[in-house]
Amino acid sequence: MSRKIARDRFSLSNERASAVDWETEIGGGLRSVGVGGGITGHGGEIIIVDDPVKSSEEARSATYRARVWEWFRSDLWTRRHPNASTIVIMTRWHKFDLVGQILDDEEINKDWKRIRFPAIAESDNDILGRKVNEALWPERYSTADLLGIKKVLTPRPFEALYQQNPVPREGGAFKREWFIPVPSEPLNMEFLVRYWDKGGTDGGGTFSAGVLIGMRSQIYYIIDSIRGQWSTHDRENRIKLTAIADKERYGSRVVTIVEQEGGSGGKESMENTTKNLAGFRVQRDLPHGNKEARAEPLADQAEGGNVRLVMGPWNEEYLDELESFPVGKYRDQVDASSGAFNRLVNQKRSTIF
């Protein structure tokens, strides 16, 4: 009897029985369309998007990426039944592909969980519990095999196809491999600068970022990066709490540098920050030149092997931003890093320290 029930349950309706649009006799079914395909009048408990971008060429097209996003947001997302589940499966060809857009949208991304299985494990926090450099399926492709593939593909397409870590082709001021990871900074750092690039929007818009860089024997250590979308009040509170933590760890050796934006608003904001940091070493910075030019000295030293990155949970997001610079959506950590670096090396230390 159970077999008869199963057959009845999964018998196809005579009215809808095509491979891309079918329904069972007792209700429920599937409708399949391509990107941009019409789904008006249809809804679902489970919505699956499988490879909406078919190639790197499509991914590089801003027009096509916008088309996919608009279709997902305006058509597909509105077709969800209450408590519906949505699954997106795709190769991450571009940082601002569909997955990137979902993760960046504060309303849509609230209940999403990102699952990424890099072919080669990147950290001790690997989702599968693998060790660093351990292959995903070693019986089929060993780490040596994958590294051989990487040499043929070059790093960028390998990162996209095998690591699911898209790196915009248009970037290139910084390369991830230039930043040599170290477990910690050395003791007795000679000079330390925490540089703040300030934003002022609570929960959206621009970010604020504070990057701490130290120097020891002409080697530069990127020690920490703090980043968030805070209101003006929360930002000032975060800057002060960070100054307190830096002083507790390094004493009075840390100088807090704050970028002052132009105009009377920038001057007033700087005055408020200075008052907020009474008792700490704080100075303003009035940067000159464009962001790309200000980032070049740090990029040169990183390429020359003179920059170390202290390992921490913030590293991946930090490196993603640097690697996508200057065309990435966000530049706050780049600006803070180049500001800290330039204050360390381009000014007379007697005026800073």
Image: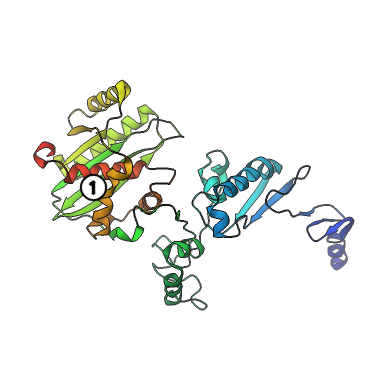
Image x and y of residue 56, in percent: 54, 59
Mark 1 neighbour class, 10 Å CA radius: few under 14, some 14 to 19, many 20 or more? many
Instruction: Tell whether 31 sits left or right of 336.
Output: right
Seen in the picture, residue 232 relative to 346 is either above or below; the reply is above
Instruction: Tell whether 55 sits left or right of 138.
Output: right
Image x and y of residue 223, in percent: 26, 50
State the colouring used for the structure image.
rainbow
Quadrant assignment, res 349: top left
Quarter of the image with the N terminus is bottom right
Q: What residue sits right under mark 1 in the picture? A: 213
Instruction: Tell whether 221 sits left or right of 159.
Output: left
Q: Residue at x 79, y 42 (%)?
A: 41
Instruction: Tell whether 262 sits left or right of 91.
Output: left
Image x and y of residue 49, in percent: 65, 54
Image x and y of residue 58, in percent: 58, 55
Camera sees residue 273: yes
Q: Amino acid at mark 1?
A: Ile
Q: Residue at x 43, y 46 (%)?
A: 328
Q: Residue at x 25, y 27 (%)?
A: 276
Seen in the picture, residue 160 relative to 75 is either above or below; the reply is below
Quadrant assignment, res 155: bottom left
Label 1 secondary element: strand
The outermost residue toward the right is 14
Seen in the picture, residue 309 relative to 80 is either above or below; the reply is below
The outermost residue toward the left is 350
Q: Residue at x 34, y 52 (%)?
A: 173
Camera sees residue 80: no
